[in-house]
Image: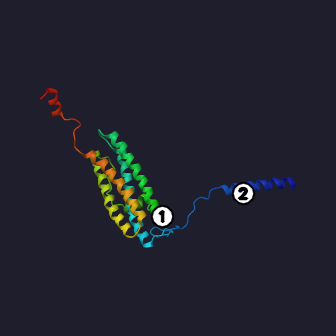
Amino acid sequence: MSTKKREVGTRINQLEAGAQRAKPVLHQHAQEIQPYGKIAKLPIALDETACESSINNLNQILADTMTLRDMYKKHHWQVAGATFYQLHLLFDKHHGEQDELVDTVAERIQILGGVSIAMAADVAETTIIPRPPRGREEAPVQISRLLEAHEFILKEARTMAREASEVGDDGTNDLLVSDVIRSNELQVWFLSEHLVTTPLSHPEQAKAVATGD
C-alpha cells in the first residue's frame, strides 16, 4: 500500500472515531443515585432529624400544590358561562403562581438533602385533595373545588410552619409562611368574591330614580 493511501486511510479512521465520540449514548440505565426517602445531607447547619421532618412535610405540600395547580389548568380550559373570559384568565394566572410555588417547594426539599416528589402517578398517590371528575362542571362548582383545595393546603401549611420553627428550620418556616400561606390566602380572596351573590344593578332603585319617588 502506498504512503498516500495509508494517509487517506488514517484520516478516514480519525474522522470515523471523531464521529463515534460525538454520537449520543442511548438507552442508558443504572441504579438511582439517591432513593426516595433517603437524605443526602448538605452542610447547611441543620440537624438531619429536622431535615427529615421538613422534607416529609414539604413533599406533602408539593403533591397538594401540584394537584391544585393542575386543577387550575383543567378549569382554565373547561370553564363556561357568562364569566368565561374573566375566569379563564384568572384560573390561568393562579395556575402560573402555583407553578412557581411548586418549583420553590421542590427546590427547598433538594436543599434539605431530600428527593422531591415529581411524577403524576406519585402525586396522585400522595395528595389529600379529592380528585375532580374528568368532565366539565359549572363555574361555581369549579370555584368551590378550588377553595376546598386551597383550604387543605393552608391548614397543613400552618401546622407544618409551626413544626419547622420548633425544630429550628427557619428556611422552611419562612417558605411556608411567606410563599405558600400568603399566596394561597390571596388566591382564596380572589376566588371567594366570585361566589358572592350581588346583582349587577338594582331594578327597584333604578325605577325609583326614574319616577322621582
Q: Residues within 10 Å of mark 2 (few under 14, many from 20)?
A: few
Q: Is residue 11 left or right of residue 187?
A: right
Residue at the right extreme of this rendering: 2
Quarter of the image with the N terminus is bottom right
Measured from the top left, where is residue 76 in percent x and y?
36, 45
Front position in the image: 140 or 20: 140
Colour theme: rainbow
Front position in the image: 190 or 171: 171
Looking at the image, can residue 8 be seen? yes
Earlier along the polypeptide chain: callout 1 or callout 2?
A: 2
**Quadrant of residue 159 in the image?**
bottom left
Identify the secondary structure beneath mark 2: helix
Residue at the left extreme of this rendering: 213
The amino acid type, in three-letter code, at marker 2 is Ala
Can you identify the residue that label 2 sits on? Answer: 17
| Label 1–label 2 contact, CB within 8 A | no
Q: Which mark is residue 65?
A: none
Residue drawn at (34%, 61%), measured in percent from left and top?
157
Can you identify the residue that label 1 sits on? Answer: 111
Q: Residues within 10 Å of mark 1 (few under 14, many from 20)?
A: some
